[in-house]
Image (spheres, rainbow, N blue to C red):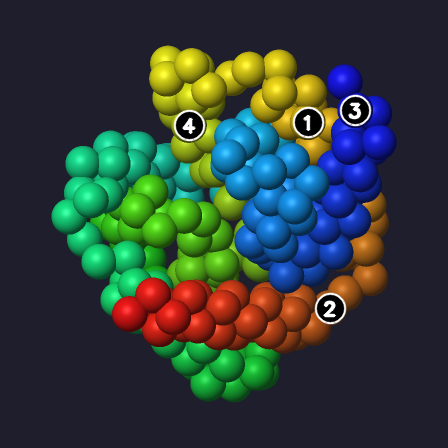
């Protein structure tokens, strides 16, 4: 067991999730190249998804009073179905074009919300989360993590700051259970994955608590600006990846 590796992964999870609390997620996007470098690309995905699943219950406890369970009720069933459909369609769809389209949507949020000055950019209702969960989970299964894509929809629903982070965490937790079940079924949960995942999960837990303390000192408008900034950055990354793959 490489304790230096575990320590670095713990620190990466702590710092990443402390800082990305103010952007309403995106920690996974930042951690992908870090875990790839530290542990190797062959086991990075199981480590990230398992580590996130370990850290999510602590995040749920930390933000329990802020969870919008109505949003979760609408989102989760369709998202689980979407994940299944995404697995079926994985080899049939062109990922590069999907990345370009989603990247352009994320970049457009800077104009949709007027750089955080607007609270809403389009009308959003709770029942819209059902088809949204199906589509996002389907695309996320094909492309990878799409956490930032959900932010404009939650913001337009009136869910912000602690409630946005709490609700996304709860929804992701139920999806994570299905992911870990799949890794176990296909024999991917070796000790080579488990120990780094535990270190990452503990780092995410500590970072989530630190992030909540930081969030208390940020106004709603500043929060929206940080969320929009990260969505634009995520969109540029996806746009670049999509164009490079063409």
Residue at image position (36%, 36%) is 76
User: Disc 3 or 1, which lies upstream in sequence?
Assistant: 3
Q: Percent x, y for residue 129?
A: 32, 50
Label 3: few (<14), some (14–19) or many (≥20) C-alpha neighbours in 10 Å: few
Can residue 137 be spotted in the picture?
A: no
Distance from disc 4 to disc 1, alpha carbons, whole Å, reads: 17 Å
Distance from disc 3 to disc 4, alpha carbons, whole Å, reads: 26 Å
Q: Quadrant of residue 123?
A: bottom left
| For residue 18, above or below residue 54 | below
Label 2: few (<14), some (14–19) or many (≥20) C-alpha neighbours in 10 Å: few
Farthest left residue? 92
What numbered label is drawn on residue 179?
A: 4
Q: Is residue 108 left or right of residue 62?
A: left
Residue at image position (74%, 37%) is 9
Residue at image position (60%, 73%) is 229
Residues 7 and 115: in front is: 7
User: Disc 4 or 1, which lies upstream in sequence?
Assistant: 4
Q: Percent x, y for residue 75?
A: 35, 42
- Name the residue that disc number 3 marks: 2
What numbered label is drawn on residue 219?
A: 2
User: Disc 4 or 2, which lies upstream in sequence?
Assistant: 4
Can residue 128 be spotted in the picture?
A: yes
* SS for dot 1: helix
């Amino acid at each position: 067991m490489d304790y230096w590796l575990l320590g670095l992964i713990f620190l990466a999870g702590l710092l990443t999730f402390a800082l990305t609390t103010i952007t309403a997620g995106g920690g996974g996007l930042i951690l992908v190249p870090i875990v790839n470098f530290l542990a190797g690309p062959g086991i990075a995905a199981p480590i990230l998804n398992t580590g996130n699943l370990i850290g999510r219950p602590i995040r749920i406890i930390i933000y329990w009073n802020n969870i919008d369970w109505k949003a979760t009720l609408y989102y989760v069933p369709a998202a689980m179905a979407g994940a299944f459909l995404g697995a079926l369609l994985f080899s049939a769809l062109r990922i590069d074009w999907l990345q370009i389209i989603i990247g352009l949507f994320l970049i457009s949020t800077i104009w949709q919300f007027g750089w955080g000055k607007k609270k809403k950019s389009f009308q959003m209702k709770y029942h819209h989360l059902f088809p949204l969960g199906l589509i996002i989970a389907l695309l996320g299964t094909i492309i990878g993590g799409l956490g930032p894509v959900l932010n404009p929809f939650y913001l337009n629903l009136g869910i912000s700051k602690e409630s946005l982070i709490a609700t996304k965490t709860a929804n992701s937790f139920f999806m994570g259970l299905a992911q870990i079940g799949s890794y176990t079924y296909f024999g991917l949960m070796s000790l080579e994955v488990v120990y780094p995942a535990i270190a990452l999960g503990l780092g995410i837990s500590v970072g989530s608590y630190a992030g909540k303390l930081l969030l208390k000192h940020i106004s709603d408008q500043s929060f929206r600006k940080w969320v929009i900034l990260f969505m634009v950055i995520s969109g540029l990354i996806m746009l670049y990846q999509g164009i490079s793959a063409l």
